[in-house]
Amino acid sequence: MSSDSDPILTDRPWLDPGQEPFIRIQAVSKQFGAFVAVDNVDLDIYKGELFALLGGSGCGKTTLLRMIAGFETPSSGRILIDGDDMQDVPPYERPVNMMFQSYALFPHMTVEQNVAYGLKRDGLDRGEIRDRVDAMLEMVELATFRKRKPHQLSGGQKQRVALARSLVKNPKVLLLDEPLGALDKRLREQTQYELMNIQDRLGITFIVVTHDQEEAMTLSTRIAVMDQGAFQQIGTPTEIYEYPESRFVADFIGSANMFEGRVTGHSGNIATIAVDSLPEPVRVEYSALLHDGMKAWIAVRPEKIRLSKTPFDDDSLNVVQGIVEEIGYYGESSTYRIRVNPGLRLEITHPNLRRPRDGRHVADWDETVYVGWEPEAGVVLTH
Amino acid sequence: MQRSRFGHLVERLQSSWKFLVIFIPYAWLLIFFLAPFFMVLKISLAELRIASPPFTPMIATDPSGATVIRLIFDNFGYLLQDSLYLNTYLSSLKISIGSTLMCLLIGYPIAYAIVRSTPVVRNILLLMIILPFWTSFLLRVYAWMGLLADQGTINDMLIWLGLIDAPIRMLYTEFAVYVGIVYTYLPFMILPLYANMEKLDASLLEAASDLGAKPVTTFLTVVLPLTVPGIAAGSLLVFIPATGEYVIPDLLGGGNVLMIGRVLYNEFNANTDWPVASAVAIVLLLLLVLPMMLYQHIQSKEAK
């Protein structure tokens, strides 16, 4: 098959119609009493993916993960792993392992005993258990801590023991529930790359539940954005960020300037939209199905808007004028909040390409500036 | 200047307050526990005499006028000579260990079920465990006499159902004593177990299951080891009072069941042999304290 040789398809198996999904979630719902935690979702995850379920608390992402692990039974629908229906398979017989948010290390066992626990349940002989535990502790760099009990470890060390324990059985799928949630920022970033490395090396399919969009963006091959028990959008980090399909996704991932208006015309791939809060219509590239007069929103990312003290000479831009209200200096970039009119403020991220001269930024507080963006910078959203 | 003086005053009041808070319970224990203990110890080292009090003083003046301290260990020797005491101790231990195990076997699943139930059900179940305490202990034991007697409720019922022809003898047997002790002390097993199990993180059970442990294995490798403190606390709370129990063997066991509480009572009241009775009490205390100290020792070693 062509996919064997096509590097684009081996990295993006979901685009390859010849690929069989490894995990299939089909019309799965979960109710707790009257509350619908997961609402009729379908999802295919492919072998070797690092898939992120992203959403706020109570969106159903953890419930979905727990159904894959077998701790919850779907109210309806079915889950297949590697072709097998998981309906009547208890957690202890599923080819998946989970890394718990609380790590759930056994407090009465040493690091070594924790990692060996799963292997002992498989009835492997002592020698093999020792070898595999050794190799795993080596990988997570905890070999010298093998005799310690969990309460003698730091947060980062516990996290690595939990990871080792869930990986040592060589599961087909590893489920990670907020794996980096309890770590501080520096350790988070470091562990993030370690996780990606391990996933790449072992080729195990990872499903990560997280509420942290940055974590989802950097870690994963694909992201499913969840809200109220349903998927709002499934796609690669780039797709999710650059081409959000709804106002919810545009708002949830990163930040976006949102303009509400009505479509007044469209030709080619450029639509003209009369924005309620702006005197001039805005021109924007579109791919959604539009018709004149329909309600629409334009989302523009803060870093895709240009800022200037002088008028732009490019007349293809959408340009408005405003006053600098606030400046947030982050070092590598600054965020400017521009008041266009009493009802409209724009957020713009501008890279600090040069050092500020005499302490002056690209624009200063209370200065009148020009703000412009290309039609390709925005996305038209219809819901 | 003034403020720092005021600060000193507050500090001093606080430290004396702290001292008071710690001192009161210790004083209580000293006066009402340690002092009586030494009195009993003293009496156990005296000799019986027909007088009031019915034992010889520890410090006396001998005919030559010198003050002597007399410590007589004969009472302890006497306990060893008469096999009644040894047999009674053994019988007491057998009954208290047996009923502790039964309490554990019955109480453990009950405590586990309570922890696993929804908060509303949990409160109702806990209330039902505590509810019997609202009735007098003596009344409850008498109720068991009514249930277990030859013409009691249980025998009447069985005969009425036609399951038996003649009543089964239950009252005034060891069985009745077991029933009474297990029934009375079961809450003391369930409550510490409940307190221990409530702290057990449910995700640990899920983790075990996730790693391939069947429910039985999860229980044996995770739940059981982590509830050892609860088992130990509950067992001690049942074992210690059960060993010295007097009312239950007296009312439900009659003369057929030997327990140390009854012997103690008889020595004090029927024989008015206070020194021997005190010796019996001291030996009982040692029997109970030694295993506790051993357990403490093991626990503190493990904590390291």
Image (cartoon, coloured by chain):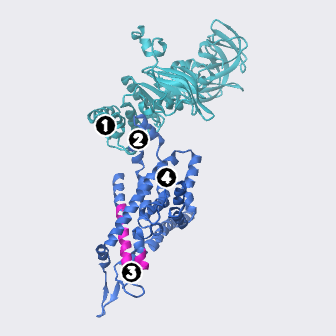
Chain colours: A cyan, B blue
Looking at the image, tell me whether mark 4 or mark 3 is earlier in sequence order: 4
Mark 3 belongs to which amino acid?
Answer: Asp
Separation (CA) of disc 1 from disc 2: 31 Å
Q: Is residue B276 magenta?
A: yes
Looking at the image, tell me whether mark 4 or mark 2 is earlier in sequence order: 4
Secondary structure beneath dot 3 equals loop
Task: Report the chain holding disc 2.
Answer: B
**Apparent side of residue B10 relative to residue A337 in the rendered image (left or right):** left
Q: Which residue is mark 3?
A: B273
Separation (CA) of disc 3 from disc 2: 54 Å
> Viewer-proximal residue, B199 or A141?
B199
Mark 2 belongs to which amino acid?
Answer: Val
The reply to whether discs 1 and 2 touch (Cβ–Cβ < 8 Å) is: no
Q: Residues within 10 Å of mark 4 (few under 14, many from 20)?
A: some
> Viewer-proximal residue, A245 or B224?
B224
Separation (CA) of disc 4 from disc 2: 22 Å
- Labels 4, 2: front one: 2
x and y percent of residue B264 in the render? Answer: 40, 74
Q: Does any portion of residue A351 appear in the rendered image?
A: no
Q: Which mark is residue A143?
A: 1
Q: Which residue is mark 2?
A: B216
Q: Residues within 10 Å of mark 2 (few under 14, many from 20)?
A: few
Task: Report the chain holding disc 3.
Answer: B
